[in-house]
Amino acid sequence: MAEFFTDVAGPVAFAGTDRGDGLGFRVYNPDRLVSGRRMADHLRIAVCYWHSFNWPGTDVFGAGTFDRPWLDPSDDPISAAYAKQDAAFEFFEKLGTPFYCFHDVDMAPPGASLAESRSNLEMLVDRAAEKQEETGVRLLWGTANLFSHPRYAAGAATNPDPDVFAHAAAQVRDAMAATHRLGGENYVLWGGREGYDTLLNTEMSRESDQLARFLELVADHKRNIGFTGALLIEPKPQEPTKHQYDYDCATVHGFLERYDLVEEYKVNIEVNHATLGGHSFHHEVAYAIENGIFGSIDANRGDPQNGWDTDQFPNSVEELSLGLFEILRGGGFTSGGCNFDTKLRRQSMDRTDLFHAHIGGIDTLAQSLLVASALIDDGALDQARTDRYSGWGADRGRMIFSDGATLDSIADEAMSKNLDPTPKSGRQELLENAVNKVIWTTT
Ligand code: XUL
Ligand code: CO
């Protein structure tokens, strides 16, 4: 079997401050205990198959730039898929991270018919199962690509043509079978084309019903095949469609409530999808946790200077610490983890750049985890929140929520007591300083 990452012996180890410029983790130390749990078990890091192994570095203006021999278009597609799988598992093992994620079409080339696509996928999945066994690497989630092929240009479940809905059903059934067979802990649905480009040709309520029908069928199928992983929807506001129906966590939550699906689905929150939706990442995480739909994260970030999905490796401890703080406060991941749905920059052409990028991103997550844990131990934020809402545990707060209270009774009491509340400081800057103190001092 060919070795592709010959410059790296692996597994990449924790080197702490001795790392220098070499390949080692500066902060990520899998066995280090943080809030009573191994760092690796907190973060549950996953590498993605698609951008890392299936993308040659093309963009809308130019051809692929990366040194990826397993993507040579002149090779037979099945042997190329095996070579790509060898490269991927060699990388997972050398990086030493526990999980990966894939779309059906990253793993195996689509065939000329649905039946041929299925048999291609089954062949590659059989081999992936052996590789998982050999390496100990596990599957965080699988998914179906329902957005690249031209047949999905007008959506998959939300397509005006029911044949496309049925085609998507066939593809998802196979991708779920593959995920189940590989012991995947989650199955993800990202609705890149489930939205519209123009309302001039779109019936929104009909398309919503179609999407809900699809989600209902997938949830039933999960039970039929005995898959016990979580079903996750990945919100994104737009791109590729002008408007996506799974815009953000609150929109997804409302949709699930409306169609009585809230017990069936959770969310996979991508950092930059939050930003594109006009939210901070930790807002999305907090919303999902507070409403019982938090599942997993895609840790890639955007670029503050543009409005598209640059899928960059995370490098902001400030941004991720607040998200991980919410995750830790919520009890941490269960079936979810931190997936790197990340793309190298196009000029990072060398195979070893994949290692540098993941190592930097993983260290950023590890440092953010340390900060999040220290923020919890510090207690200043929780104390400030408790103090700020303390009135709701006292007489008037309880009275407002009591069964017999009416707008009249509350208003009459306000008038009889001549209430004249004094505004209190929200102490935002003081709290920001408290966060920075922890960011700057945590090691
Ligand atoms: C696209 C995106 C997808 C999903 C999986 O923005 O994030 O790669 O994560 O389909
Ligand atoms: Co993603």
Image (cartoon, rainbow, N blue to C red):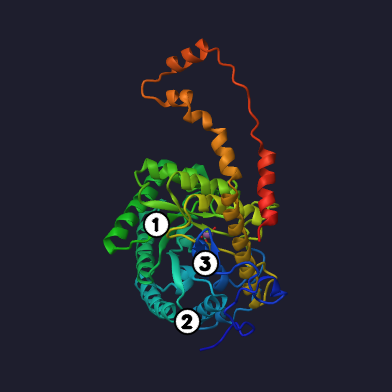
Tell me which residue sits at (66%, 58%) in the image.
442
Label 1 SS: strand
Circles 1 and 2, Cβ within 8 Å, touching? The answer is no
User: In the rendered structure, which disc, 1 or 2, sits on the residue that comes first in sequence?
Assistant: 2
Residue 101: percent from left, percent from top: 48, 67
- Near-viewer residue (33 or 121): 33
Residue that badge 3 annotates? 40
Disc 3 residue type? Ala
Tell me which residue sits at (66%, 76%) in the image.
23
Residue 198: percent from left, percent from top: 53, 45
- 10 Å crowding of disc 1: few (<14), some (14-19), many (20+): many
State the CA–CA distance, disc 3 to disc 1: 23 Å
Residue 83: percent from left, percent from top: 51, 82
Foreground: disc 3 or disc 1 = 3
Residue that badge 2 annotates? 82
Vertical arrangement, residue 164 with respect to residue 122, above or below: above
Q: Is mark 2 within 8 Å of ligand 1?
A: no
The reply to whether residue 12 is visible in this rendering is yes
- Near-viewer residue (212 or 52): 52
Q: Is residue 217 left or right of residue 393?
A: left
- 10 Å crowding of disc 3: few (<14), some (14-19), many (20+): some
Residue that badge 1 annotates? 231
User: In the rendered structure, which disc, 3 or 2, sits on the residue that comes first in sequence?
Assistant: 3
Residue 49: percent from left, percent from top: 51, 70
Disc 1 residue type? Leu
